Amino acid sequence: MRYMTLIYEYAGGVEGLSEGQHQALLEKHRRLQQCAREAGAYLGASELKPAATAVCVRMKNGVPSLSDGPFVESKELFVGFYLLECADLDAALRLAAMIPTASHSGVEVRPLDADCGYEGPGQSAEALGREGGKSLFALLNYLDEDFIAACSPGDMQALVDSSLSMVRRAEAAGDYVTGSKLMPAATATTISHAGDTQRVVDGPFSEAKEVLLGFHVLACESITAATDYAKGLPEVGIGAVEVRPINYYAQTAPQWLEWNSSALS
Amino acid sequence: MEQLGLVIKVARSGALATLIRLLGDFDLAEEAVQEATCRALVDWRHNGVADNPVAWLVQTGRRYAIDTLRHNAMARQHQRKLLWPQETLPAHDNDDALSALHLPDDQLRLIFVCCHPALAQEAQVALTLKTVAGLGVDEIARAYLSSPKTIEQRLTRAKRKIRSAVIAYQVPDEDQLAGRLDAVMRVLYLIYNQAYTTLTGPALLDSRLAEAAIYLARVLNRLIRRHAEVQGLLALMLLQHARAAARVDAGGMPVPLERQERALWDAKLIAEGTAMVEKCLRRGPPGPYGLQAAIAAVHCRASSAAETDWTEIVALYDLLEAMSPNPVVTLNRAVAVARVQGAGAGLRILDAFGEHKNLLGFQYYHSARAGLLEELGEGPRALTAYRRALALCRNDAESAYLSARIERLRRRISVPPGESS
C-alpha cells in the first residue's frame, strides 16, 4: 500500500529556530529518509515553498481565474509530504512518527488510491527540473467535504477520468513527474502530540472543510505554465486547485537534498 | 440445550477471529460464522458436539464463504481482496491442519485490530464489543443510548478504514506492544465504566455490558499471560462487579458503599478478584489498574463499613494520584482522607482542587462536597452543592437519589422548596 504523509506546521513554527535547531531538524529528515530507503519504502518527498508563493485556480463567473495565496487559510500550514510504500498502516506510521513535526504539530497519513490510473513516480524530478531548466510545482486539488460525501463512486470516477486528460497531456509534453488521488479523508490517521508524547488518532489533521483530494507534481518552465495545466483539472470547477512551487526529492535522487527551512517558515 | 448454546457462543468468538484472517474480510467472516453456528446448532444436537468446536466452525464457515464467493457475481473482485489465497488453505477437512492455525493468536490479532489507535475510540469500543465479545448491534446501541443505525454506521466505517488504510491483522511488534496493549486495556476499562455508571439514562448498571467487559478482560488475560496490569484490570472488574447486586435497592435507588448490604456482595467474585490482585501485586509495583483493584480489594475485605481500612486506602490513592493524576482520583482521595482525618480535611482538598482544575462541571465533585458539608453541619451550603450535582446528573437512578437527599436535608434544616441556591 502506498501512503502520503502530510506534514503540518504552525504558522511561524520554525521562524524562531536557531541554526543549531535547524540543523537538528534537517538531521531528523535525513535519518528518516535513510530509514525509508533502507526499508524500500521511499518513493519521494516534497517541501512546499512558502504559502505566499501559492496561486489558486478557481472558477469565477464561468472562467477559471487566479488568486494569490493558499486555498486553505488556517493556523496550521501544509508544508510538505513524503510518499511511502509500506506493507501496512503500522509500518507507515512508524516512519511518519520520525517526521520532526509529529512531535509538536502533526502529521497525517493517508493511503493513495491505487485505482486512480495515474499514481506512481514518473520521470526523475532531478532530470526534469535541473537539466531541463524547469522548476517543480505541486498542483493540490481541494474539494469541499460535503461535495465529496455527495459524490457516488461513479461521480468520483468521472472526476478522476477527466483529470487523466491533463495528466496525459503533461506526460506527452515531458512535464509530468508524479501524482495520485488520495483515499477519502475518513481513511486518514493522524499523529499528533500530547505533551511530550506522540499520539495516534483517527481522522485527518486539518479540521478545514476543504479536503485535499489529490495532487500532481509537474516540471514546468514557469508558474504560468503550471497554472495552465491546473485549469485543465475538474476540481477548478467545483473546488479549487492550488499551485505551489516545491522542492521534490524523487526516489531516484542519489542522496537527500537540503531540506530548505525557508520553505517552512 | 442451554449448554450447547454456551459451547457455540464460546467457540464462535474464536472461530470468527480465525475466519477474518483466512477470508481477509470482516463482513464475509461474520456471515460465514453466522451460517456455521446455525449449522452447528442442528448438527451438534443430533451428532453431539464436535471434538474441536472452533475448528468445526472455522471449516464449515470457510467452506460456506468459498461457495458464496464462487456463486457470487462479484466473486472475481472479492477474491482479489483475500489476504490468504485460497490455494494455501488445507484442501480437505483436516483437524491437524486447523490446529496448526494457532487459534489463540488469531483472537489476539483481532483484539489488537479492533483497538487500533487509528480507529476512533468509540469505533474501537463498538468493534470490540461486536466482534470479540459477540454483542449484537441492538445491545451495543442500548448500552450507549444510541440508535442501532448509528452503531451500524460506526462499525461499517471502522471496517472500511481497516481495509482501505490496510491495518494489518497482526499482534504489534515488541517495540510497539506496550503502548498498544495500553490502548486495548483502555477500551476494556471504558466499556466497564460505561456499564458501571451508565452516565445517562435509567439504569445504574448495565449488567450485559459489564459481563461483556469481564469476558473481554478474561480473554485478554488468557492471551497475554502474566501481565500485571491486565491482571489488575480483570481483578478491578471482578471486585467492582461483585458489589453489583448491593449497589441498587429494591426500588432501583443507588445505595452508597457504606450503606450497602454486604451479604449481597458476591463472595466468589471477591475471592477470585482478591486472588488476582495478589498475583498482580506480587509482580512488583502495581500500575494504575493494579492500584485501583487493590483499593477495591480493601473495601471488599472489610466485613462492615466501619472496619474499612481507610488509612491503607488513602495510601493507595496517594500512589495512584502520583502515577496518573486525574480529577476522579483526587476526588476519591479527598473522600478517603475525610474518613481518616475528618470531613474538614477532605473538604479542604476538594475546595483547593476545584478552584484549580475547573471541576465545576463534574457531578461527583459537587455530590462529594455536599456529603462532606452535610457531615460538618453546613446544611445550606450542602443543599446548594446537592442541587448543583442534581443539575449535572444525567442518570435517572442517581437523579432520584440526589433528589431524595435534597428533600431529606431540606426538611432537616427546614428550608422551603426552591430556596437557598
Image (spheres, helix red, strand yellow):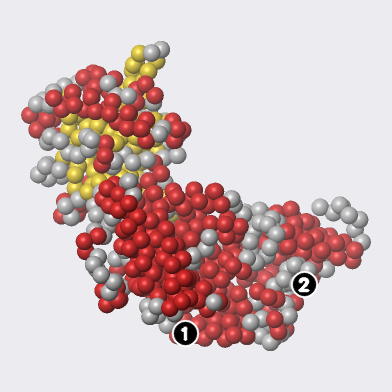
The disc placed on residue B279 is 1
Residue holding disc 2: B250
Depth check: B175 or B414 in front? Answer: B175
Which amino acid is tagged 2? Ala
The disc placed on residue B408 is none
Disc 2 + disc 1, Cβ < 8 Å: no
- Locate residue A128: give its quadrant: top left
Q: Please give the name of the residue rendered at 39% of the width and 61% of the height, measured from the top-left corner.
A: B32
* Nearer-N-terminus badge (2/1): 2
Q: Position of residue B335 (x, y in %)?
A: 67, 71
Depth check: B60 or A227 in front? Answer: B60
Q: Can the viewer see residue B112 in this picture?
A: no
Give the answer, above or below, for where A238 lies relative to A83. Answer: above
Which amino acid is tagged 1? Lys
Left or right: B339 in relation to A34:
right
Query: From the viewer's perspective, is the residue at label 2 or at label 1 nearer?
Result: 2
Depth check: A251 or B214 in front? Answer: B214
Question: Could you tell me which quadrant the C terminus of chain A lies in?
Answer: top left
Q: Please give the name of the residue rendered at 30% of the width and 76% of the height, measured from the top-left corner.
A: B95
Say which chain tag 1 marks.
B
